[in-house]
Image: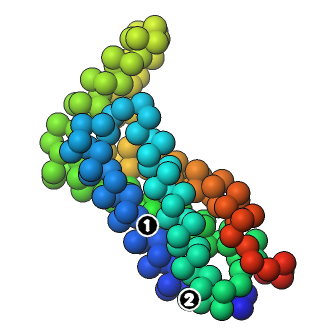
Amino acid sequence: MTDFNWKALIIVGLVAGLAQVATGVVMYLAGIYFASWSMLVSLFVLLLSIVIGTRWYTGRYQEGEISYSQAFVVGIVISVSTGIVYAIYNIISISFFYPHFLDELLRISTERARANQQTPEAIASIRETVTANKIAVGNLIRLSIAGSLLSAFTSLTLKTKRARG
């Protein structure tokens, strides 16, 4: 049972990524995508994806038993796959569907920097970070790292056996 069904894991990760994309679209259309707390919504969706995906994978491919390390790997695959799907979505959506996204993000980021009394140099450097590619890579890294950390904790409760692996 220590071998992984990588195809199934990637599919679970892709489905989780699509759930993250759907969440992003809904938040954007609802006008809350740029809210300071919206990242918490994304993290919650990622957490749910890890838990549901790991449970599904355990029942379907692990005969109902999974060790901590196996659950951790499943969670990491889900997280990285989610990050990849979301990064691709970022590039496509910013390039083709949300023509004013970068302008809006730049405006909001600049307003927040001024409200936090950041230096003019810091405010000017915001322009360099507001590109579709940098947003996509940033989201890929954030979702992968945050998901890996979440997986480290969820695996404690999702494990069903003490076996090594």
Identify which residue, 8 or 93, lies in the foreground: 8
> Going by the image, does 156 lie left or right of 42?
right
Residue at mark 2: 60
Residue at 35% x, 65% y is: 18
Amino acid on which disc 1 is placed: Ala
Residue 5 horizontal/vertical position (percent): 57, 88
Q: Which residue is mark 1?
A: 16
Residue 14 x %, y %: 41, 72
Mark sitting on residue 45: none
Left or right position of 149 against 80: right
What distance separates the C-alpha of mark 1 from that of mark 2?
17 Å
How many discs appear?
A: 2
Foreground pick, 139 / 50: 50
132 or 73, nearer to the observer: 73
Task: Please say if the residues under marks 1 and 2 sit with CB atoms less than 8 Å apart.
Answer: no
Mark in front: 1 vs 2: 2
Instruction: Look at 50% across and 57% down and name the residue there.
Output: 46
- Is disc 2 placed on a helix, strand or loop? helix
Return the disc, 1 or 2, that comes first in the chain's sequence: 1
Check disc 2 and give the amino acid type. Arg
Provide the secondary structure element on which disc 1 rests.
helix
- Quadrant of residue 11 in the image? bottom left
Residue 78 versus residue 60 in the image, above or below: above
In the picture, which quadrant includes the C terminus? bottom right
Q: Position of residue 15 (x, y in %)?
A: 40, 71
Figure quadrant of residue 157: bottom right
Q: Is residue 113 among what the camera can see?
A: yes
- Position of 122 relative to 106 (above/below): above
